Amino acid sequence: MPSARRSSILAAASVLLLLAAGAGVLFAASSSVEVRVDGQVLTTRTLSHDVAGVLDHFDITVAPADRVEPPPDAAVHDDLVIVVERASTVELQVDGRAARKVTAVVDTVDDVLRAAGMGNLLEREARITPPAGSRVEAGDRIEVQLPVAVRILVDDEEHRLTTYADTIGGALDDAGVSLGERDLVEPPTARTLTPGTTITVRRVEVVAEVVEVTIEHGEQRRETDELLEGETQVETEGRDGLRQRTYEVTLVDGEEQERELVAEEVVREPTDRVVKVGTGREPEPEPEPEPAPPPVREAQQLLADLGYPVGPVDGIDGPKTQRALCAWRRLEGREVSRRPLQPGEVEALRATDGLPAARTAGRGVTVDNPCQALYLRVDGRWREVHQASTGTDGLPRAGSYTISRKRPGWHTSTLYPAPEPNMYNSLYFHGAIAIHGSHHVPPRPASAGCVRVTPAAADQLFATLRVGDPVRVIGAW
């Protein structure tokens, strides 16, 4: 019995020695490995040949975007440290476009941009939220806004602007451009801003304009035997009426685009001109010696030679001759009137040597209402005498004025529109009242308030006079 028991013990001891020897061989063949993942540190000895086998040993699943260092196919060696970094998914939105998801191993905003292939944005003047360098976590959202270069055309100026605004309206706000209620913006303010956009702002203004329109008077003819047949006499002078029209005018950048009549009022009714028409018979005249007619033709020629606008030299002492006589009397310091040629005036005309010196030095112009004439003064002398026709309503009033602006060429009055241009080389000296050329310059008031001269006279005055030169208006018709 003792020998059998000893044999069993020896046999068991042999088995244990064999197992221990095998384990020692396996231990000597394995490698010590450390795995760092998800905040944990795992250690083991493994017979795996590559990193992927070690990860399988710990049942560690690796997503495609996760980072494993060394890579899964790397060989295992003793004291190997395997680091598994989990990828995070972060949203990235650029310039308000649809956000994209970026899944990668990232710690900061910079990492996300580089992982998305947009690392160049870090070198540009982009607005990044949260700022570059900030740490990110899974589920965070990064917004990137790039500056946009635009051109703004407003108030006759061009502005170049680099802005982070999303819309046209935002760019205008950044440029400090304030918009009126009616202003036009192209493209519209709500439109999304794109690089290189040209924004045009057109200023819209609505103003009221009052236009006065003449209502021409009529004429009544009444027969009377108080006058001889063929004779007429004005019993009541006619007077034109006046209508005021109020327009609402839309201006775009100062240019009229539209006008609408909003009100109309007759402020003065016209008064008909009443003319008596003779029906009486002329009695037989008693023979009387005919007085010798004054030498009108000679006076006309003398006036024309002196430079006074006498009209045709025809021997007829009519309104044009009387206008020239009136102007001559004025400049020569005689009694001013529109009377016909008076005794002794032919002799005085013969003794007149050109236009006299003026009492005022320098350059200027005088409008003579009683004579319906205009005198041009240059270097203290009267240079020219022109025929003129002033306003039927007594305008312009006597007084001293200055030329405020000049408008060349033919144009139509805005207050008294005409089918054809009726004002030439205008010299404005009192609001809308001007000296201007006209094809109709009668020897009496006929205008709506301006001073008419012939086109040739208007050429000379426009070339000679300057803004700021004095205009003197004397007397009344």
Image: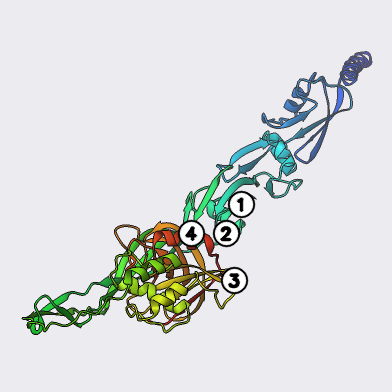
Q: Is residue 248 left or right of residue 398?
A: left
Residues at badges 1 and 2 in contact (C-beta under 8 Å)? yes
Residue named by callout 2: 177
- First of labels 1, 2 by sequence position: 1
The residue nearer to you, when weighing 401 against 40, is 401
Q: CA distance from mark 4 to mark 1?
A: 16 Å
- First of labels 4, 3 by sequence position: 4
Mark 1 element type: strand
Residue named by callout 1: 159
- First of labels 1, 3 by sequence position: 1
Relative image position of residue 325 (x, y in whole percent): 38, 75
Q: CA distance from mark 1 to mark 2?
A: 10 Å
Relative image position of residue 399 (x, y in whole percent): 48, 81
Q: CA distance from mark 1 to mark 3?
A: 48 Å
Res 443 visible = no
Given this view, does label 1 or label 3 mark the residue nearer the observer?
3
Q: CA distance from mark 4 to mark 3?
A: 44 Å
Say which amino acid is labelled 1. Answer: His
Residue named by callout 4: 203
Residue sticking out furthest to the bottom:
226
Say which amino acid is labelled 2. Answer: Val
